Image (cartoon, rainbow, N blue to C red):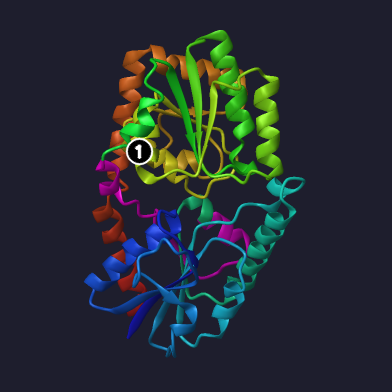
Amino acid sequence: MRVIQLLSTIANGDAVSNDAVALEKVIKSMGYSTGIYAESIVSNVKRGVAQPVEKIGTLDKSDVLIYHFSTGTKLNYDIARYQCRKVMIYHNVTPPEFFKGNDERFSQICEYGLEGARFLADKMDYCLAVSTFNKNDLINMGYKCKIDVLPIVIPMDDYKRKPSRHFMKDFRDKKTNILFTGRVAPNKKHENVIAAFYYYKKLYNKNSRLILAGSYREEDRYYLRLRQYVERLGMGEDVVFTGHIKFDEILACYKLADVFLCMSEHEGFCVPIVESMMMQVPVVAYGTTAIPETMNNQGMILESSDPLVAAGCIDRVVTDNNLRKEIIRLQNERVNDFRYEAIADKFKKYLSSFIDGD
């Protein structure tokens, strides 16, 4: 019997790819023949980590195909033809309306993804959702099979590496650093992060900086609008768009950060929040979608996206040392729930139960 994983794209450092690689280790420890297959294998992936989807070969009824669902792709329809047991790990799809007027192509990809998710509703034998929010998404799309919640696996040992000293030296000027990490995309609501920082800088702390760490395309409408917004607010020098950076430079961003501010309006899990917790950076986050669950409904969770409220909360975290310590204490407790061993044990239990027909 084979237990294989399939995903649309595998790339070094990508959260879904990291999840697949970590789960493969668990599957191997259970004694099953396994492998990772992908529609697209990015050049930065080490040879042998994954194989093209065309090399899956024949799957029989006893085999198990674990499909990581995260985007719009032809695979969402192709997997229906495999004559084996099918498991979906649902990472969510960003609602297409976030990209209307910014990136019509990506809006169409997201719509295609949601259509694919609805298509598979009666074709999966079992589902794992990375959050309860995602589980409810599947239920609302008509999934009737059993659905369990399994948080995404985060390679915590990677965050013990040394941050880039070269990157950090340019920011060693005693400014208070507010950080947000994530691809520059409309659902992340960078404009709300920028607005909150504007009020924080104006009302509380002139000696501050906003670091927006994440990839963007120079010609992207949303990115260009953000740049114009920053210039209109007169904060050109104090808002840093890093673009795509290396992992040790991302670690440097967390090392520099005094507060992690997340104003995103759609997250199926939000790995950067857990990264911040691991790096001892207090999180201030707008409590939408899966974010309260990822934070275990503790810490500085905002009930609205009001930038003035967010600015005041940032100031409290920066200036109230007792509050800061308490937030970090709560975050450290929550991080324990995401340990590899904890997630691996859950996955073993869920997979064994599915295979045994329990």
Residue 59 falls left or right of residue 27: right
Q: Position of residue 59 (x, y in %)?
A: 43, 88
Task: Name the residue at 34% across, 66% down.
Answer: 350
Task: Name the residue at 51% across, 9% down.
Answer: 204
Q: Which residue is mark 1?
A: 251
Q: Position of residue 183 (x, y in %)?
A: 54, 44
Q: Position of residue 178 (x, y in %)?
A: 47, 25
Residue 289, quarter of picture? top right
Task: Describe the element under mark 1 as helix, strand or loop.
Answer: helix
Q: Quadrant of the C terminus?
A: bottom left
Residue 257, quarter of picture? top left
Name the foreground residue: 101 vs 285: 101
Residue 35 in the image: above or below residue 238: below
Residue 163: tell me if it is visible: yes
Does the stretch in magenta take in 250? Answer: no
Region in magenta? 135-161
Q: Position of residue 218 (x, y in %)?
A: 64, 43
